[in-house]
Amino acid sequence: MHSPFMYAFTDGCLRIALDVEDSRKLNAVYKGFLNSKATIQIQDFGAGSKRLGNTRSIQQIAKTSSSNGKYGQLLYRLSRSYKPERILEFGTSLGIGTHHLHLGNPGAEITTVEACSNTFNAAKARLPESVKALNMTFDEFLRSEVEGVYHLIFIDGHHDGKALIDYVNRLLPYSDDETVFVLDDIRWSDSMFEAWKQLSEDERFHVSIDLFRVGIILRRPTQRKEMFVTRY
């Protein structure tokens, strides 16, 4: 833990406290979903949920969201610490993670992509107007909408190792040396963990941080290759 980068990450980024007003806004969004009585039909384009069927209540989706609690706070902290100008999110779900990214850096230009139209509509109704929300598959986005440079890329969807590597490879031309890639559910399956190990060992990335559920990779070619594993 003597690396200057890791010291700055753990003692800087991970120690950022949620602003009181931001916390109030996030709680209001979450409670709004918990109070919903709606049930929607899910069209899954990836590996699917391990716990839920295709008919799900908004309450169920909110309770099992990857971006609840400390993992939502991680997105907030990354956004607040690195101040990315442009953010790309693959897998909007209800937009809970999107709200954390937005409040961490309200001036950021955020694009979020969700393939399931019913989930998309539920999220869209509560997202800030400044967020560009797209109802399409990740592949459709990569073939038609991707442009410019994204400074933080959050991939939370599909849950297939081969697909994860494909998305990272196709997004690399739209990143720079400072772009933070945040990969959710790296231990969701054997294929996801194998993909994570491959990406963390990839010589194109000079920093990898394994937070057990979430993995972070960065290029940072000015420093020697470093691989970290730490509890979050």
Image (cartoon, rainbow, N blue to C red):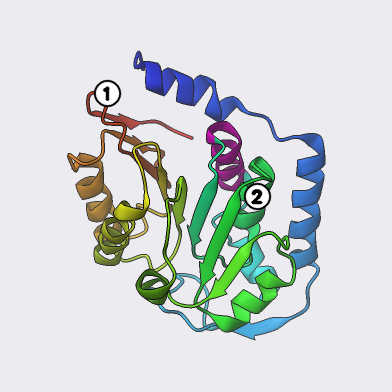
Please state if 200 lies on the left or on the right of 109 as rendered: left
Q: Residue furthest front?
A: 148
The overriding secondary structure of the stretch rendered in magenta is: helix
Task: Report if residue 79 lies within the magenta region.
Answer: yes
Image point (36%, 52%), residue name: 186
Say what amino acid the circle numbered 1 marks: Gln
Quarter of the rendering containing residue 21 = top right
Residue that label 1 marks: 223
Is the C-beta separation of discs 1 and 2 under 8 Å? Answer: no
Please state if 203 lies on the left or on the right of 102 as rendered: left
Please state if 143 lies on the left or on the right of 108 as rendered: left
Q: Disc 1 on helix, strand or loop?
A: loop
Q: Which mark is residue 156?
A: none
Number of numbered discs on residues: 2
Image point (49%, 77%), residue name: 115
- 3D distance between C-alphas at marks 1 and 2: 29 Å
Image point (75%, 65%), residue name: 34
Q: Disc 2 on helix, strand or loop?
A: helix
Q: Which residues are magenta?
A: 70-82
Q: Which mark is residue 102?
A: 2
Say what amino acid the circle numbered 2 marks: His
**Residue 229 drawn at (x, y percent):** 34, 32
Task: Report if residue 231 lies within the magenta region.
Answer: no
- Toward the viewer: 189 or 198? 198
> Looking at the picture, does residue 112 appear above or below residue 105?
below
Of the two numbered discs 1 and 2 on the same chain, state the one appearing first in sequence: 2
Quarter of the rendering containing residue 103 = top right
**Residue 148 drawn at (x, y percent):** 43, 55
Is the N terminus in the top left, top right, bottom left or bottom right quadrant?
top left
